[in-house]
Image: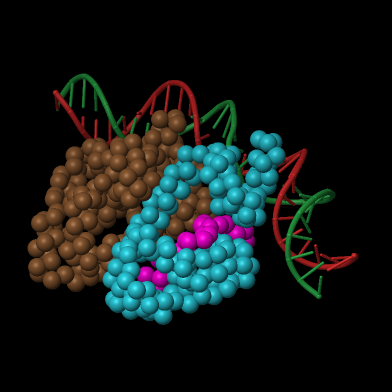
Chain colours: A brown, B cyan, C red, D green
Amino acid sequence: MYKALFRHIEKIVTLEPCEIEILESCLNVSTIKKKELVLQEGQICNILYFIIEGCMRQYIINDKGIEQTLQFGIENWWITDYLSYHNDIPSHFYIQAVEKSEVITIEKSTLETLLIQIPKLERYFRIVAQKSFGAAQMRIKFLFTMSAEERYHHFNGLHPEFVQRVPQYMLASYLDFSAEFMSKIRAGKI
Amino acid sequence: MYKALFRHIEKIVTLEPCEIEILESCLNVSTIKKKELVLQEGQICNILYFIIEGCMRQYIINDKGIEQTLQFGIENWWITDYLSYHNDIPSHFYIQAVEKSEVITIEKSTLETLLIQIPKLERYFRIVAQKSFGAAQMRIKFLFTMSAEERYHHFNGLHPEFVQRVPQYMLASYLDFSAEFMSKIRAGKI
DNA sequence: GTAATTTCTTGAAGTACTTCAAGTTTTTTA
DNA sequence: TAAAAAACTTGAAGTACTTCAAGAAATTAC
């Protein structure tokens, strides 16, 4: 059940059997129904989610009442609002299951004690966060330099299976253009 | 000389005197002239920079040959390309001093041994990276939800001194609009 | 302290998108 | 399996920007 996470961790640090045992005792698995929210705007986010199976997204609702997806997460990704988490401030985001998902949850207080018992995990989470930050910078680069059509084709080239997996309007907002424009790009009407 | 960094670290973890000594022996200070590059596109980035004084920026050059700033860094910020750093791949970015800057540099191999000697620093760098990632997500939110004019006024409201500190065209590209448009916003001609 | 360079401004023309509205198709639910 | 809900498509009209070009102002360099 926790195998996916152990495998992910072992790519970065090596855990002793006793450490795996401690870790195991701190984890919980939960099933999130499609469209269920695990975080809402205004709430303080004090849980980290590791996606074992399924797909989650982080989104906002803009002035016009339209949802805009900032981030998707799939198998073997962590998803959370680190700003709300670290600063204990209300989140600006919603986090929702796009598909029925299995996630491992770790609460902030549990993680704190866990990191004291297994300091190696500091390293694991450091490297995960640094790589995520690097990926966010690349994302900003693509948003800055590519046209809407280029962003779509680029993303589709990198992750064709994923494009099939989520509603078009969610992907459109993730790539920062309207659902209607996505439809026209796909039809080759641009 | 290293005081600024020690103070930054002590906000997150407490170092023993002997640890400070070890850390000190691993650091170097260097002065970067205005406009000097510390990283160029295509190079592998294996240095972390901590800004003691001055201002640096990470930018790209787009298809039209125009520079677009992705990130600024000022006093007490780390700046680097973590994707290039971790994956040993050529960077997509330039990193340059906007003003004459004093920076602490740590090379990758040095940091690796340092983190083994002082595991507490894993925690420090984890928290720095997680907060940076959170900030990057907020940045994407603002890019998604605000008009050019709103982004300017919002940024100017948060960091008025900084707006005075860097050339307008750099800030314009950071906020993702043209230098000419920035000029019109500031003149109230929008 | 004057020349050279960099940065900022302005207006006119163009364009890559958005918005709206209505209809169609697909998926979900009971 | 029918009804309801969600997702996608299409065209027409609008707009928030960009690009270009040229001059003015500020800063840097010798």
Q: Nearer the viewer, residue A141 or A22?
A: A22
Residue A19's image quarter?
A: bottom left
Horizontal arrangement in the rendering, residue A99 relative to residue B177 (left or right): left
Residue drawn at x 29%, y 50% as measured from the top left: A79
Horizontal arrangement in the rendering, residue A29 relative to residue B35 (left or right): left
Residue drawn at x 48%, y 77% as measured from the top left: B28
Q: Is B47 drawn above or below residue B10 in the view shown?
A: below
Horizontal arrangement in the rendering, residue B109 relative to residue A95 (left or right): right
Residue drawn at x 62%, y 67% as measured from the top left: B100
Q: Is A117 drawn above or below residue A68 in the view shown?
A: below
Query: Looking at the image, can residue A54 be seen?
Result: no
Expressed as whole percent of the image width and height from the top left, the position of residue A18 reads 9, 68
Query: Looking at the image, can residue A92 be seen?
Result: yes
Expressed as whole percent of the image width and height from the top left, the position of residue B104 reads 48, 72
Horizontal arrangement in the rendering, residue A149 relative to residue B67 (left or right): left
Q: Nearer the viewer, residue C15 or B34?
A: B34
Q: Is B39 drawn above or below residue B75 in the view shown?
A: below
Q: Is residue A21 magenta?
A: no
Residue A158's image quarter?
A: bottom left
Q: Is D28 drawn above or below residue B22 in the view shown?
A: above
Expressed as whole percent of the image width and height from the top left, the position of residue B170 reads 61, 55
Q: Residue furthest front?
A: B17
Residue B183's image quarter?
A: top right
**Residue extent of the magenta highlight:** B61-89
Q: Nearer the viewer, residue B187 or D5?
A: B187
Q: How many marks?
A: 0
The C terminus of chain B - image quarter: top right
Residue drawn at x 16%, y 70% as measured from the top left: A15
Q: Nearer the viewer, residue A25 or B30?
A: B30
Q: Is residue B63 magenta?
A: yes
Expressed as whole percent of the image width and height from the top left, the position of residue A105 reads 19, 50
